[in-house]
Amino acid sequence: MLLNGNIPLRFKPAEFHHFNWLYSAAPCFPVNASKVNIISDPRQFYDTLCERFRSANRRISIASLYLGTGSMEKKLLEVTRMNLEKQKDLQFKVLLDYQRGTRGEVNSVSLLKEFVDDIPGQCSVNLYQTPRLHGSWSKALPSRYNEIVGLQHMKLYIADDSVLLSGANCSNDYFQQRQDRYVEIEDAELANFYSELIDEVSNFSKQVVKEGIHERQFVTKEILVKEMRNKVSVFLERWKEQQQSKLINLQETKDDNKDTWVFPLVQMGEFGIRQDEQVTSRVLASVPEGSFMQLATGYFNLTDEYARTLLKDCKANISLLMAHPNANGFLGASGPAGGIPHAYSLIARKFWQKVVDSNQTRRVEMLEYERPGWTFHAKGLWYYPPGSRVPWATIVGSANLGERSVKRDLEAQAAIFTVSPELQKKLHQETQQLHEYASECSKELQKRETPLWVRATVGLFRTYF
């Protein structure tokens, strides 16, 4: 690939030449592996958030589905509030989903309202609502069920120049016994990128003010979709060009201090922005024969494109890890939601049948995570080059490799490539820990019973979960 006419941008190690196309797909942030922190435990995730928010000097920016209302969340807010009162230049920005953040009498907004009331100059709280629910639809669907239409699903936690990417919400469950992934990167430019991404979405969201919730007015839903698509597209292109110029300068000065490359990926299917989907599909299709890929998702619902790519285009051996029904967050839910674990098992069984029909049972394996008292919410992938016993790349963030992640929700991910033996070892330890509670499940899937009503409806509602 040539940039600016004649200067090539390429990964330094030959092992990554299959992925040179990434430079034209997303902005690239070169960092040193010592600035990447792999967190493995939900409690450590919580402690890290507390420490970062306690010591931040300039900014704290959060994007999450919602903020929980338990004692741990209140303590996190208390730590943040004390820091804000001490440092008058510190800015606190929060982006949540409107439907989820306003559910119930005590909710995310009621906890954050005092920040807006007491220190409006330092605090902003914004609530994204999918355009599908604008107007009368917002009230036509009952609470909880309106959330299936589309959500703000990005999970980003920024403190000064540190950005923590995860799939975990800012909630008590995710701080204790719900296993997710958490990767913290210290880099000013990367933190600026994700902070600006939060700002871009916030500009098209409802705003919490002293008087209540202020709704920004757009003439029509179509105009809102067009304007947000244009704004985010311009934002992504600007950062890509900016980073390409910096990468060229690095090559010319032969700065060898960078051993890790981070490519932020954004998915907003509602607005025609499909960066994460396109990159993930192409990564799966680009890996060479003899390589190994591990994939994980809390909710197994591969899109047809992902399934086709895995079975027809991908040359690597594949291991798919998903939640056992007992480790599914919807287990025991009332109403139709209680059938969701059965639906995921049914979808997984149908995918495995495709594996069998295509005679690929030696190349593809399916595993389930089951740990007493725990739920499983980890997602992403790890890439092992041919002959390597450690991964050289990973994709981490909020997307579940599924239908609604691609088509309905706002998602933020990052593809991380590294030649650092230390970071490769840490990534391997991360996936080894996740697989400590995993077991092969293909035979169990075939025997598992599915309620008749789930079998009858799963096809109709597949894109909603």
Image (cartoon, rainbow, N blue to C red):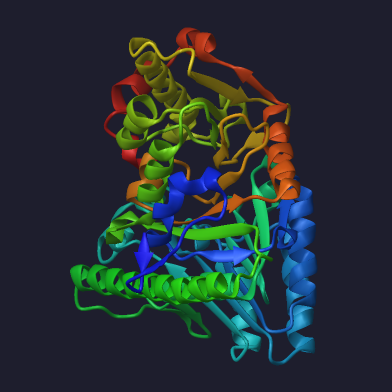
Q: Is residue 107 above or below residue 161?
A: above
- Where is residue 428? Give x, y as percent: 70, 38
Q: Nearer the viewer, residue 408 or 29?
A: 29
Mark yes or no: residue 182 visible.
yes
Mark yes or no: residue 126 visible.
no
Residue shown at the point (41%, 47%) measured from the top left: 405
- Where is residue 55? Give x, y as percent: 79, 76
- Where is residue 186? Give x, y as percent: 69, 67
- From the image, which quarter does the N terminus lie in? bottom left
Count every numbered label the image shows and give the total: 0
> Along the horizontal axis of the image, is 75 left or right of 130?
right
Quarter of the rendering containing residue 205: bottom left
> Along the horizontal axis of the image, is 84 left or right of 145?
right
Q: Is residue 53 above or below residue 409?
A: below
- Where is residue 399? Give x, y as percent: 47, 48
> Along the horizontal axis of the image, is 420 left or right of 22?
right
Residue shown at the point (67%, 31%) measured from the top left: 389
> Along the horizontal axis of the image, is 51 left or right of 444?
right
Q: Nearer the viewer, residue 20 or 242?
A: 20
